[in-house]
Image: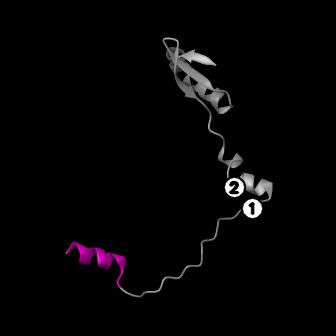
Amino acid sequence: MQISVREFKAHLSRYLSQAQQGQSVDVTCHRKVVARIVGVPSAESEGVARLVADGAAQWGGGKPVGAAILLSPVGHSVSAMVLEDRG
């Protein structure tokens, strides 16, 4: 669908709603297309949800658990090294 800049400004929410529903909106200025408004797919339909649906990943609905990395207190701390470097 092509609309003029003036029409787009006058009915912004209507055209954004249409873009969100999957219709692309071409905005024109002097009958030349200057912008294309397209909706952004919901985050639920992308990424992890698709991997879970395909069976490539499993998710129980909780927060991810971080890696069990333990840092040993050997040597100087980063903040001490920065202060030492600054002089």
Looking at the picture, does residue 51 appear above or below residue 13? below
Judged left or right of residue 4, residue 79 is: left
Identify residue for label 1.
Answer: 57
Looking at the picture, does residue 59 appear above or below residue 46? below
* Point 79% across, 54% down: residue: 54
Q: Is residue 83 magenta?
A: yes
* Point 29% across, 74% down: residue: 82
- Write the start and end of the magenta stretch as one range: 76-87
Q: Name the dominant secondary structure of the magenta segment.
A: helix
Instruction: Pinpoint residue 61: horizontal percent, then vertical percent.
Output: 72, 61
Separation of residues labelled 1 and 2 (CA atoms): 8 Å
Could you say which is closer to the camera, residue 47 or residue 10? 47
Q: Is residue 74 magenta?
A: no
Label disc, if present, on residue 48 of the rendered structure: 2
Could you say which is closer to the camera, residue 76 or residue 14? 76
Instruction: Pinpoint residue 68: horizontal percent, then vertical percent.
Output: 59, 78
Amino acid type of the residue that numbered disc 1 sits on in the rendered structure: Ala
Query: How many other residues sit within 10 Å of disc 2, few (<14), some (14-19) or many (≥20)?
Result: some
Could you say which is closer to the camera, residue 72 or residue 13? 72
Please state, as top left, top right, bottom left or bottom right, where the N terminus lies in the image.
top right
Quick one: which residue is furthest to the left in this view?
A: 87
Amino acid type of the residue that numbered disc 2 sits on in the rendered structure: Val
